[in-house]
Image: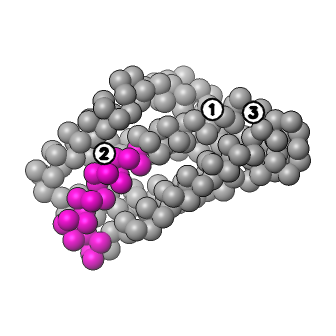
């Protein structure tokens, strides 16, 4: 599997949770209350998998290599994607910050959780589309076979050394649980 194929596969998993987050935001608005444990699991997935695992591969390995290859000057929207990663981190921080008050039934905090869940989901959908449709074809065009091999090894290193053994699989199970699907289905 090429590095971009790995990232597209991870996008598919993230999109499962994005759809579930949208449904959760709607459920919160309808009920006027938050299931704090469930929302905390969304925040855990977004920070632990989407950011610490997936975005780490892009920011530490893929983006720098593309910059070395001059891809920024050839239409790869790297800075925009980095900015979106940071905006996503802000949404997750805001969800966590509002969660205590939301769990206690504080209406502004309940609304804040729902708003940040749905805003983050919308941003991630557009972000993933931009990466899949623009960045990854650009990467596949500009990266040499040696770059591809080195990135694949780097991705494995991120998962084993930074993310930790078994953590990736735990997040896959969490994604399927949040989405209401069996892992592998």
For the residues bearing labels 2 and 3, Cβ distance under 8 angstroms:
no
Q: Earlier in the sequence, mark 2 or mark 1?
A: 2
For the residues bearing labels 2 and 1, Cβ distance under 8 angstroms:
no
SS label for mark 2: helix
Q: How far apart are the alpha carbons under marks 3 and 1?
A: 9 Å
Quadrant location of the N terminus?
Answer: top left
Residue at the spot 13% in from the left edge and 57% down from the top edge: 144
Residue 150, horizontal then vertical, whole percent? 16, 46
Front: mark 2 or 1: 1
Residue at the spot 42% in from the left edge and 27% down from the top edge: 167
Q: Which residue is mark 1?
A: 41
SS label for mark 3: helix
With respect to residue 89, does 83 lie above or below?
Answer: below
Looking at the rendering, which quadrant does residue 68 occupy? bottom left
71 magenta-colored: yes
Q: Residues within 10 Å of mark 3 (few under 14, many from 20)?
A: some
Q: Which mark is residue 5?
A: 2
171 magenta-colored: no
In this image, 115 relative to 108: left or right? Answer: left
Q: Which residue is mark 3?
A: 36
For the residues bearing labels 3 and 1, Cβ distance under 8 angstroms:
no
Whether residue 91 appears in this view of the structure is: yes
Q: Of residues 132 and 57, which is closer to you in this image?
A: 57
With respect to residue 63, does 107 lie above or below?
Answer: above
Q: How far apart are the alpha carbons under marks 2 and 1?
A: 26 Å
Q: Residues within 10 Å of mark 1 (few under 14, many from 20)?
A: some
In this image, 49 relative to 150: left or right? Answer: right
Looking at the rendering, which quadrant does residue 88 occupy? bottom right
Q: Which mark is residue 78?
A: none
- The magenta span reads 54-74
Q: How far apart are the alpha carbons under marks 2 and 3?
A: 34 Å
Front: mark 2 or 3: 3
């Amino acid at each position: 599997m090429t590095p971009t194929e790995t990232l597209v596969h991870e996008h598919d998993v993230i999109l499962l949770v994005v759809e579930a987050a949208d449904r959760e935001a709607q459920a919160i608005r309808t009920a006027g209350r938050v299931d704090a444990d469930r929302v905390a699991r969304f925040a855990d997935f977004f920070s632990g998998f989407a950011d610490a695992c997936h975005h780490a591969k892009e920011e530490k390995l893929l983006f720098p290599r593309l910059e070395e290859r001059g891809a920024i000057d050839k239409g790869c929207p790297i800075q925009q994607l980095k900015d979106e990663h940071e905006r996503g981190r802000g949404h997750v921080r805001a969800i966590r910050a509002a969660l205590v008050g939301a769990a206690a039934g504080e209406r502004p905090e309940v609304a804040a959780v729902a708003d940040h869940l749905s805003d983050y989901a919308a941003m991630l959908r557009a972000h993933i589309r931009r990466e899949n449709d623009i960045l990854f074809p650009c990467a596949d065009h500009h990266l040499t076979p040696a770059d591809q091999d080195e990135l694949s090894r780097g991705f494995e290193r991120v998962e084993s050394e930074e993310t930790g053994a078994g953590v990736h699989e735990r997040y896959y199970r969490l994604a399927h649980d949040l989405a209401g699907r069996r892992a592998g289905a």
